[in-house]
Image (cartoon, rainbow, N blue to C red):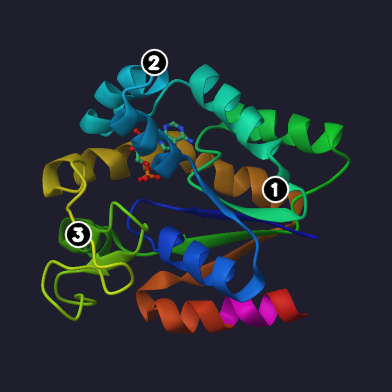
């Protein structure tokens, strides 16, 4: 069983590593940000509520996120493991996850913490483009698609997320420092946290994660 949690600031490469782990190990990536964006696009009550927090770079309230994740983690594809990307983001969410794990008789196998300096995070976020159809992630200069503006994987037009501008990114990183960083100590105490320097590049981080997963 592989229950993996990816921790790190916005722009630290969680989405990129989650996609690689899914590809290599066949376990689903559960990204609260993606689920919320789908809800915003579909205009669901959750999406309507979440939108203003997301656009301001603030966290969506814990009760909404915990209810959403309770449903998602009970789905069939999560029975044999999952990669959590973007959840938990607060101590209350981490405690809710622990409760869920205790009830389902399991534990997290790995917590991978990706670090990078703030200027690197901002540059990555501001240059990030995503495919709204298949979720592929690009960067304008570091990893552009082969045809400008077009997703290599599915051919859809790639877009910039509304919250991926330098100003909102600053706030998202501040929110991360205040509300999510305490989770580092939370998981360090459990003895399952491993730290990787994401500024080394996604391929090096991927190789290190592979080593841990194979051990
Ligand atoms: P992400 O795609 O992970 O960068 O998330 C985008 C935005 O969705 C965040 O800035 C928050 O507004 C919201 N969000 C995603 N995950 C969570 C979470 N676990 N708790 C609260 N808000 C979240």
Name the element at disc 3. loop
Which residue is at 38% across, 61% downward?
A: 12
C-beta proximity under 8 Å, tags 3 and 2 = no
- As measured in the structure, the alpha-carbon distance from the residue carrying label 3 to the one carrying label 2 is 26 Å
C-beta proximity under 8 Å, tags 3 and 1 = no
Horizontal and vertical percent position of residue 146:
19, 81
The N terminus: image quadrant: bottom right
Give the vertical position of 200 relative to 62 (above or below): below
176 and 134: which is toward the camera: 134
The crowding category of the residue bearing disc 3, from other C-alpha atoms within 10 Å (few below 14, some 14 to 19, many at least 20), is: many
Q: Which residue is mark 3?
A: 158
Which residue is at 32% across, 54% downward?
A: 133
Q: Give me the disc on residue 121.
A: none
Q: Which residue is mark 1?
A: 78
Q: Which residue is mark 2?
A: 45
- Start and end of the magenta stretch? 208-212
- As measured in the structure, the alpha-carbon distance from the residue carrying label 2 to the one carrying label 1 is 24 Å
């Amino acid at each position: 069983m592989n229950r993996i949690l990816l921790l790190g600031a916005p722009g630290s490469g969680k989405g990129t590593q989650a996609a690689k782990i899914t590809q290599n190990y066949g376990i689903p990536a559960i990204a609260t940000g993606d689920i919320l964006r789908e809800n915003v696009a579909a205009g669901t009550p959750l999406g309507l509520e979440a939108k203003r927090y997301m656009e301001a770079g603030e966290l969506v309230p814990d009760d909404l996120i915990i209810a959403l994740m309770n449903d998602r983690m009970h789905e069939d594809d999560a029975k044999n493991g999952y990669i959590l990307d973007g959840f938990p983001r607060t101590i209350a969410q981490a405690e809710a996850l622990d409760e869920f794990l205790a009830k389902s008789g399991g534990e997290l196998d790995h917590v991978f913490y990706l670090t990078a300096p703030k200027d690197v995070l901002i540059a990555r976020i501001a240059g990030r483009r995503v495919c709204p159809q298949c979720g592929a992630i690009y960067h304008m200069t570091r990893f552009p698609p082969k045809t400008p503006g077009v997703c290599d994987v599915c051919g859809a037009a790639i877009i910039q997320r509304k919250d991926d501008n330098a100003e909102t990114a600053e706030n998202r990183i501040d929110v991360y420092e205040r509300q999510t960083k305490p989770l580092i100590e939370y998981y360090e105490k459990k003895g399952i946290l491993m730290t990787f320097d994401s500024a080394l590049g996604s391929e090096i981080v991927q190789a290190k994660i592979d080593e841990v997963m194979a051990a």
